[in-house]
Amino acid sequence: MKNILTAPFVTETGKTAANMYRMGFDERNSGNISIILDENEVGEYLDLSGVIRGIPLDFDAKALGGKILIVTASGSYFKNIADAPEENLGIVRISPDGKTAELLWGLKGGGRLTSEFPAHIMSHAARLSADNENRVVLHCHPTNILAMTFVHELDERKFTHTLWQMCTESIMIFPDGIGLLPWMVCGTNEIGIATAEKMKEFRLVIWAMHGIYGSGKTLDEAFGLIETAEKAAQVYMLTAHLPRVNTITDEQLRSLAESLKLDYREDFFA
Ligand code: 2HA
Ligand code: ZN
């Protein structure tokens, strides 16, 4: 058996969490990460029949029955994950009936799964229905995205369009746009269901006055999406109160999208 502490899915999760902390996206214990892992790869590091304990789930996780995920622990500080992965991460297998998360490793000292586990599992199921290679769901609190939800109309079409206008790269990175939910109580099945509904259509979903969800095939893709949206939101927050002298016009955005043959949300132009 190889040493689990050297497994790329453990080290990369720690590195991404540390990056997100340094970017200011994950103060204190905020944010959460989950990644669907390859069973054969995990089997190189762990005895897959060695269930440490069963964690009852109070939502239906059957859509991910049999799948193994690495996930951040409830209360884990992103700055500490790389140094103490066994306390701050867990590897679980969803039981076939979707009622239990079988702990295979981590959550040392009786740790619990992230409070946003329902939103993560439901989002994975939704993303997999759109893209069977999707593996990663990330949640965090990027400052400018959050700030923007206080001062910009909460309409996902208008919000996306504004972000596209803020950086040339935006439409190239998220031509599929960003879903937007109103403020809701976090950590509940209800916000999980609402997030997953948006995830059928979008890889990015903003929770107004709270944060953002990003998804992708890899950690880099999901993190890169969030980073790019946050950059655009930063430019918005730096300029929204100033007279706008120049802008990227819709015609320019469209010609960029056409020249790159992007599958973009044409209906998101005003
Ligand atoms: O994990 O960010 O939304 C802490 C949170 C809850
Ligand atoms: Zn949060």
Image: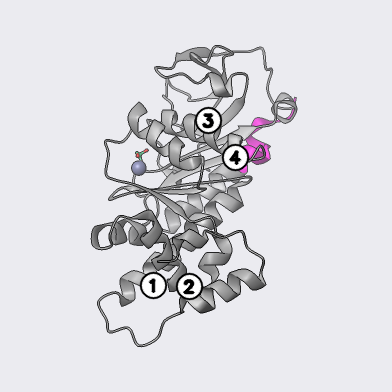
Task: Give percent across and percent down for residue 248.
Answer: 46, 79
Mark 3 vs mark 2: give the one in front: 2
Instruction: Compute the Cα span from label 1 to label 4.
Output: 31 Å
Mark 3 vs mark 1: give the one in front: 1
Q: Are marks 1 and 4 in contact (CB under 8 Å)?
A: no
Task: Give percent across and percent down for residue 78.
Answer: 44, 44
Q: Which residue is mark 4?
A: 130
The amino acid type, in three-letter code, at marker 4 is Ala
> Which residue range is magenta in the image?
1-11
Query: Mark 3 or mark 4, which has the lower sequence index?
Result: 3
Mark 2 vs mark 4: give the one in front: 4
The amino acid type, in three-letter code, at marker 3 is Glu
- Mark 1 crowd level (few <14, some 14–19, many ≥20, 10 Å Cα): some
The amino acid type, in three-letter code, at marker 2 is Cys
Q: Residue at coordinates 37% horizontally, 30% vertically from top-left?
A: 115
- Mark 2 crowd level (few <14, some 14–19, many ≥20, 10 Å Cα): some
Residue 49, by quadrant, is: top right
Q: Colour scheme of this structure image?
A: one colour
Q: Which residue is mark 1?
A: 235
